[in-house]
Image (spheres, grey):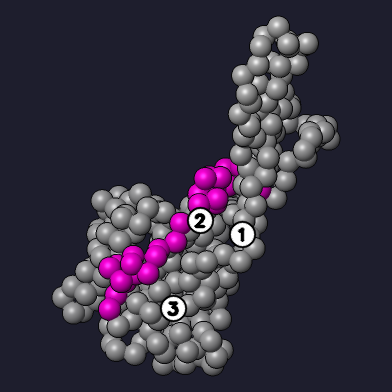
């Protein structure tokens, strides 16, 4: 496979196409940001960037930026939720998530304050009223400075004490060597119907792994059901390829960047990460194959694809 990829890079315009796609994506995101701010006529020329008041925050990704209502409500599970949905005995074992507030910054259209009804004869300038009534200006919505709910909790361990040991390693920085040096990171969002298949494939792997799920569903009912399904799958047959299973219920749906936040959080615990999408199936030897190829090609990024 590596020989095929090398030949492809040498004998095709693949890299040129990738660079063009990257530039196109950047232009598309810039245009979308300006459209959000009601400036729709930009021709894509980065030498002519329009002035907009208030100036848009170009650090906000207009594709993945969260919904303003989710940032403002900041959905976290109550103690009642955890009493019902967390795993008994290990649910209180948690790893504190790193927090990148820029991923939670977003925008919304300005909310107009309700005005008292006035006599139409008192209007001095009808056009002025229409401008105010149709004010679609965009205002920033900032992420909280001290957010709650930023933790990943253990929902399953194949042997008692494994989750607590990982928590201790994370807190102390003293890494144990007699466990997997890799971890699997999964995103989850509105894929409940195939979660059993996707996570089931991971549970049937020939190599044991610690699995971390970043859950972008903000509905507590869906969260609880997903935690229950995940716990059931990990427990099945008693021969699960899942060594420990952790879930972070994100207070806000921040999209794919969540998987990288998870990797950043637990980076001191592992040397390799395997990212699995929530709609991809995996052969039972996938993890074993990745580990073998990583040893053979330590500087390479290795991937597979198997969409359900």
Checking the image for residue 144, the label placed there is: 1
Does residue 120 belong to the magenta stretch?
A: no
Badge 2 marks a residue whose secondary structure is: loop
Place of residue 122 in the rendered image (x, y in percent of width and height, measured from the top left): 73, 11
Res 244 → quadrant: bottom left
Residue 233 lies, in percent from the top left, at: 23, 68
Dot 1 or dot 2: first in sequence order is 2
Q: Separation of disc 3 and disc 2 at Cα?
A: 19 Å
Q: Is residue 69 magenta?
A: yes
Q: Earlier in the sequence, mark 3 or mark 2?
A: 2
Q: Are marks 1 and 3 in contact (CB under 8 Å)?
A: no
Q: Residue at x 30, y 61 (%)?
A: 224
Identify residue for label 2.
74
Label 1 to label 3, Cα distance in Å?
A: 21 Å
Q: Nearer the viewer, residue 156 or 112?
A: 112
> Residue placed farthest to the top in the image?
121
Give the SS element for disc 1: loop
Q: Secondary structure at mark 3?
A: strand
Read off the magenta span: 60-88
Look at the numbered discs 1 and 2 and tell me whether their residues touch, using CB distance below 8 Å.
yes
Residue 106 in the figure: left or right of residue 245: right
Left or right: 171 in relation to 58 = left
Quarter containing the N terminus: bottom left
Other residues around mark 1 within 10 Å, as few (<14) / some (14–19) / many (≥20): few
* CB-based contact (under 8 Å), mark 3 and mark 2: no
Label 1, label 2: how many angstroms apart (C-alpha)?
9 Å
203, above or below 123, in the image: below
Q: Which mark is residue 94?
A: 3
């Amino acid at each position: 496979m590596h020989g095929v990829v090398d030949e492809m890079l040498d004998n095709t315009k693949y890299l040129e196409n990738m660079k063009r796609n990257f530039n196109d994506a950047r232009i598309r995101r810039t245009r979308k940001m300006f459209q959000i701010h009601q400036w729709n006529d930009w021709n894509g020329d980065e030498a002519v960037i329009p002035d907009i008041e208030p100036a848009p925050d170009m650090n906000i990704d207009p594709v993945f930026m969260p919904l303003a209502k989710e940032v403002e409500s900041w959905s976290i599970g109550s103690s009642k939720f955890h009493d019902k949905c967390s795993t008994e005995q290990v649910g209180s074992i948690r790893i504190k998530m790193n927090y990148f507030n820029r991923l939670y910054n977003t925008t919304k259209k300005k909310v107009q304050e309700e005005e008292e009804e006035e006599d139409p004869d008192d209007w001095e300038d009808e056009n002025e009223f229409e401008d105010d009534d149709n004010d679609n200006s965009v205002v920033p919505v900032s992420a909280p400075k001290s957010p709650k709910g930023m933790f990943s909790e253990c929902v399953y361990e194949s042997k008692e004490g494994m989750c607590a040991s990982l928590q201790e390693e994370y807190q102390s920085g003293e890494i144990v060597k007699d466990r997997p040096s890799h971890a699997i990171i999964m995103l989850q969002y509105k894929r409940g119907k195939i979660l059993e298949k996707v996570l089931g494939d991971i549970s049937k792997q020939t190599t044991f792994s610690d699995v971390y799920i970043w859950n972008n569903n903000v509905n507590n009912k869906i969260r609880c059901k997903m935690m229950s399904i995940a716990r059931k799958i990990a427990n099945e047959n008693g021969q699960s390829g899942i060594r420990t299973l952790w879930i972070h219920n994100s207070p806000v749906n921040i999209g794919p960047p969540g998987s990288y936040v998870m990797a950043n959080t637990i980076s001191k615990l592992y040397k390799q990460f395997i990212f699995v999408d929530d709609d991809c199936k995996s052969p039972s030897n996938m993890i074993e194959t990745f580990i073998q190829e990583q040893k053979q090609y330590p500087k390479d990024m290795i991937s597979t694809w198997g969409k359900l």
